[in-house]
Image (spheres, grey):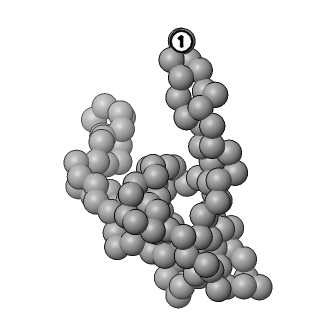
Amino acid sequence: MIIQNGTIQAKVKFGGGGIDSSTGFPVKHKEAAYEAPIPCQYSANQNNQLGLVNGEHFTIAHYSILIEQSAQPFTAEEIRLCDMRGRIIGEYSVMSIEPLDAVCELRITV
């Protein structure tokens, strides 16, 4: 059982994508949309303003997210993380998905 403090939405890409058979170059997806929100519990592993490239600062953020394990596997490559009020915290690439079988949950690291 998770203690919900936010939601995640999996990004679904469709239309195009893959490799162009004549040139061998990747083809971009034409459209992307987000699925329905999934309740989650998230915590920041790292979140600071110390990133620096060419004199410009940026935010370094890594989160650990827990969601309930369902019958359908979670296979998203990108997610949108929102807090309880619906404010977007950020859009992140999924680094790993680890099943926690003892508690029937998934740990997603972004």
* Image: 101 above or below 37: below
Residue placed farthest to the top in the image?
A: 54
What is the count of numbered marks? 1
Q: Is residue 6 above or below residue 87?
A: below
Residue drawn where x is 59% and y is 20% of the image: 52
Left or right relative to 56: residue 31: left
- Local secondary structure at mark 1: loop
Camera-nearest residue between 22 and 110: 110
Q: Residue furthest right?
A: 102
Image vertical order of residue 8 relative to residue 60, above or below: below
**Percent position (x, y) of residue 10?**
42, 64
Residue at the location (62% across, 80% down)?
2
User: Does the rendering let one see residue 55?
Assistant: yes
Position of residue 59 measured from the top left corner of the image (x, y, whole percent): 55, 34
Is residue 109 placed above or below 57 in the rendered structure?
below
User: What residue does disc 1 label?
Assistant: 54
What residue do we see at 49% from left, 82% from top? 72
Report if residue 79 is visible in the image.
Answer: no
In what quadrant of the picture does the N terminus appear?
bottom right
Q: In this view, which residue lies farthest toward the front? A: 85
Mark 1 residue type:
Asn
Q: Residues within 10 Å of mark 1 (few under 14, many from 20)?
A: few
Could you say where residue 60 lies in the image, as x and y percent from the top left? 60, 37
Q: Quadrant of residue 42?
A: bottom right
- Residue at (28%, 48%) from the top-left corner? 29
